[in-house]
Each structure stands twice: as C-alpha cells, then as structure tokens.
Image (cartoon, rainbow, N blue to C red):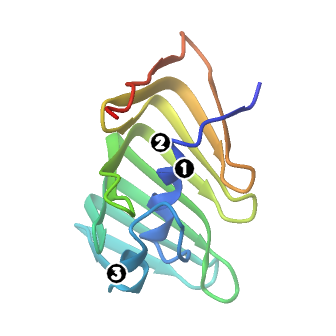
Amino acid sequence: MFSSFSKWPPLLGLLLGLGLGTHAWALEADARQPLYIEADEVEVNEADSTSVYVGHVQVDQGSMRLLADHVTVYHREDRQPRLIIALGQPARYKQLLDDDQGEVQAFAKRMEYDADKDELVLIGEGLLIQGEDRLTGERILYDRAKARFRAGGAGRVKITITPDES
C-alpha cells in the first residue's frame, strides 16, 4: 500500500550529504558545500569499491548532519555511491529544508539508500520528524522517484500530522 506523503520528501537528504546531487527538498545550498567525514577508523578498499567508516561517524555537508556508529559506502566504477548503509543505536540524520520549512530529522537502527532505485529505507525503530509531524514504523521505505512511502513491519505504523497554523 503505497501512499503519497509530500510532507516527507526530505528523507533523501541523507544522500545529499554523501554526494548524490541536489534534491529540491533539502536546503539547496548544501549540495555546493564541502563534505566532511570524521570517524574513529576508515578502510577504503578500491578492489571491491567500498569505504567503511567505524566509530562515532559524523558526516556534515552544509546544514546536513549524519551520525552513526558504522557507515558503509558501495561505490560505482565512477566512484559515485551506489549503496549507502548507516548503522547506529540509532543512526541519526538532520537537515534544513528549503523555503524556511524548518528541519527534517530521521532516526533508525539501520538506514539504507539505493541510488539505482532512488529509495531510502529506515529499518528498526524508524522515526521521521518534520516540525510537529511524526511517522514511526519498524520499516519505512521511501521511493523518491515516485514520491511515495510504505511503512510497516512488526508493530503498528503511527503518523501524527499537525495542522498548519494559517
């Protein structure tokens, strides 16, 4: 059951911070900012086109910040990310939105972004927050190309949508 949920398109901002291009929903200027990555350890394996960041991983680009215990990036031949997996207790993401729409935050034990499918998946205690609006579920899949999401898994999906003050 895919549903349109236009208030949540910033989910993919996580990927903006990892060099995947400009997304209309995230703060556009972020894509032009330098990318900074800090971790306790890093291992780059050019033979299998992976880079692994372990321990207090922090990724910053403009207003975007990703915090995780472990981040693995699987690269294409052109060195662009193909698959990004962030693990944490929980992994945490935040980014400002364009047009003064505030900030989006995401939390999950595992975050996966598949660049080929243009999908972001939050797995394990997934939580998305924008302003007073919240979406929780054990598994939240966001299909960026179609601007649709699916949430489910163990337990119930919970959505709180706060009316605009107009």
153 relative position to 160: left or right = right
Tell me if mark 2 has few (under 14), some (14-19) or many (20+) residues whose alpha carbon lies within 10 angstroms of its own.
many
Q: Which mark is residue 9?
A: 1
Identify the element where label 1 is drawn: helix
Of pointers 3 and 2, the one earlier in the residue sequence: 3
The quarter holding residue 35 reads: bottom left
Q: Which mark is residue 27?
A: none
Which of the image's four quarters has the C terminus? top left
Q: Which mark is residue 110?
A: 2
Q: Which residue has dot 3 on it?
A: 35
- Looking at this rendering, what residue extends furthest in the top direction? 155
Residue 110: x and y, percent? 47, 42
Q: Residue at x 43, y 79 (%)?
A: 31
106 up-or-down from 54: above or below: above
95 relative position to 123: left or right = left
| Nearer mark to the viewer, of 3 and 2 | 3
Q: Residue at x 46, y 72 (%)?
A: 18
Tell me if mark 1 has few (under 14), some (14-19) or many (20+) residues whose alpha carbon lies within 10 angstroms of its own.
many
Q: Residue at x 64, y 77 (%)?
A: 48
Q: Residue at x 60, y 81 (%)?
A: 80
